[in-house]
Image (cartoon, rainbow, N blue to C red):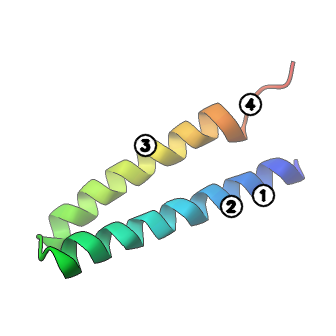
Amino acid sequence: MFREGLAFVSCRLATGILDLAMMAFFVDLLHQNDMLIKILSNVLVIILNYLASKLFIFQKNE
């Protein structure tokens, strides 16, 4: 259970950093619409969190 907890927190931290990096790159550097980029970033983060949880973090041990 400790490994799952650590993997879960690490994944969420990584996708949070990805969200910040996307916002900085697209909004601050490329001057794109902040609301649109935030929506797209959140969709990507949700998909990545789901896939990480499904495929790597909460695997069924048989």
Q: Which residue is mark 1?
A: 6
Q: Please tell me whether residue 59 is drawn above or below residue 43 in the rendered image.
A: above
Judging from the image, what secondary structure is the residue with disc 4 in?
Answer: loop
Q: Which residue is mark 4?
A: 59
- Residue 8's x, y, as percent? 69, 53
**Distance Cα–Cα, label 4 vs label 3:** 17 Å
Q: Earlier in the sequence, mark 2 or mark 3?
A: 2
Circles 2 and 3, Cβ within 8 Å, touching? The answer is: no
**Distance Cα–Cα, label 1 vs label 4:** 14 Å
Q: Residue furthest bottom?
A: 28
Amino acid identity at mark 2: Val
- Residue 29's x, y, as percent? 20, 79
Q: Earlier in the sequence, mark 1 or mark 3?
A: 1
**Distance Cα–Cα, label 1 vs label 2:** 5 Å
Circles 1 and 3, Cβ within 8 Å, touching? The answer is: no
Q: Which residue is mark 2?
A: 9
**Distance Cα–Cα, label 1 vs label 3:** 19 Å
**Distance Cα–Cα, label 2 vs label 3:** 16 Å
Horizontal relation, residue 5 to residue 17: left or right: right
Judging from the image, what secondary structure is the residue with disc 2 in?
Answer: helix
User: Residue 6 falls in which quadrant of the image?
Assistant: bottom right
Callout 4: 10 Å neighbours few (<14), some, many (20+)? few
Amino acid identity at mark 1: Leu
